[in-house]
Amino acid sequence: MSLENDQNVHPVKLPGGALQSLRSALSIKAVSAGVVATLFGCSGPALIVISAANAGKLSNGQTVAWLFAVYFLGGLISLVMALRYRQPITGAYSIPGAAIMSAALVTIPFSEAIGAFVMAGVVVLLLGASGLVGRVMRWLPMPIVMAMIAGALIRFGVGAVESIGAAPLIAGTSLLAFFLTSRFLKSVPPVLVAAVVGFVVAYVSGSIQAGDVDIAMVAPQFTMPHFSFDAFMAISIPLAALVLGAENAQATGVLLAEGYRPPINAMAIISGIGGILAGFLGGHNANIAGPMTAICASEQAGEERERRYGATLVNGVLFCAFGLFAGGAVPLIQALPKALIASIAGVAMIGVLLAALQQAFNKQIGYQVGAFVALVVAMSNLSLFGISSPFWALVAGIAVSALLRETPREPAAQPEETMAPAGKRV
């Protein structure tokens, strides 16, 4: 079972030796984008996992094992995919998947949930190995996919604005630093400057405080899986749908919007492998992640697309470290003001959002009404059968386009044919 099963998708060949290529990818901008993605992924999402663990009345050791599984394996996925394909294909875990566990673990024993986590990974792996995921993504109209991406990520932009209301001094100075740096200091990563300025203001104003999470620096406690049909239906199916219909779909759309040719089937395969391994370790899934890929693939990671995979490498190393020291790292992350994290994540999404909106509503391509429906559904908090809005945005957009018999204005081409290779302008 190989990760090479995507037709016409090959690793990017960079000039010079491997070490020289790696050094050039680890630019200041790439490092800063990787750090921003880590701050985003290790703050609020980690607390969602802890909340789900508390709902299931898990021990501290089981909670640490869960965090270790999703972060360490998510980091390994980033390292494997970035080094193999030289693209910012970033790993983490399904945040909505962690959220639905808060309800599921109330009625389902954790040992059965572990079995369901493993089975969800098996489902994703089989679908990826069959090539079905790649065929579906190539069939989907790109304007609808891009609109779904814009709708799913716009909340980060809105969050940056709302952060000003929550913490005017911290978020306001951070955002101002970002735009001033973008205007006057072209050689300096604006995201990095915004993060440093925001941190300094937060520290001086006394807004950095110790976290309140009651979790000690303890060793992981692993749980033997048990398999049940009820847990499979309640957890495995929704989780597999979230991994493929939300996380992988978002990541694929983001990469396409940025001009890459992502290995769609390989992304599904490694998400399935990550799900199986994470399940046995006690976590709900480790997979390709949409938001982290969006940050690492954005212009904030560097002007040259073929070098942006360095941000994913940085994110992968930091995720692995966070997983190894999860018991002690969570309170440190909690000490950062939420408004600071929200403001930085929001401005990091600007380039991706602009590219997605431009491709979603290009009249020359068509599917305009379907794209609009996908946009507003993805922007909503719609959740049906435990599956979040990005998946239903694709379903609704395609259904409306089919009902209205919308067709492309120009002959449709496969994503691999329409998008230029990584690093080439379209």
Image (tube, rainbow, N blue to C red):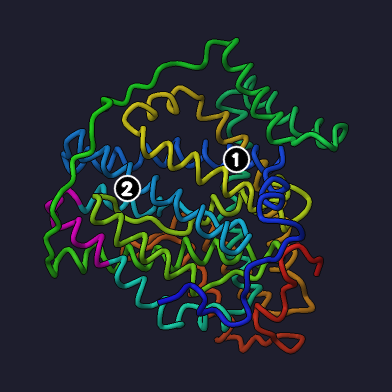
Residue 277: x and y, percent? 30, 58
Mark 2 touches mark 1? (CB < 8 Å): no
**In the rendered view of the protein, which quadrant contains the C terminus?**
bottom right
Q: What residue type is labelled 2?
A: Ala
Residue 373: x and y, percent? 58, 69
Query: From which residue to which does the magenta span run?
Result: 105-119
> Mark 2: which secondary structure?
helix
Image-quadrant location for residue 84: bottom right
Residue 155: x and y, percent? 56, 48
Whether residue 399 can be seen here: no
* 173 part of magenta stretch: no
Q: Disc number at residue 69?
A: 2
C-alpha span from label 2 to label 1: 24 Å
Q: In this view, does 403 lie above or below 91?
A: below
Q: In this view, does 120 lie above or below 332?
A: below
Relative to the observer, which residue lies in front, 126 or 339?
A: 126
Residue found at x 57% / y 84%: 139
Residue found at x 54% / y 44%: 315
Give neighbour class at mark 1: few <14, some 14-19, many 20+ (Cα, 10 Å): many
Whether residue 406 can be seen here: yes
Q: Is residue 103 above or below residue 144?
A: above
Give neighbour class at mark 2: few <14, some 14-19, many 20+ (Cα, 10 Å): many
Q: Name the residue under label 1.
A: 345
Residue found at x 75% / y 36%: 189
Q: Which amino acid does label 1 sit on?
A: Ala
Q: Is the magenta stretch mostly helix, strand or loop?
A: helix
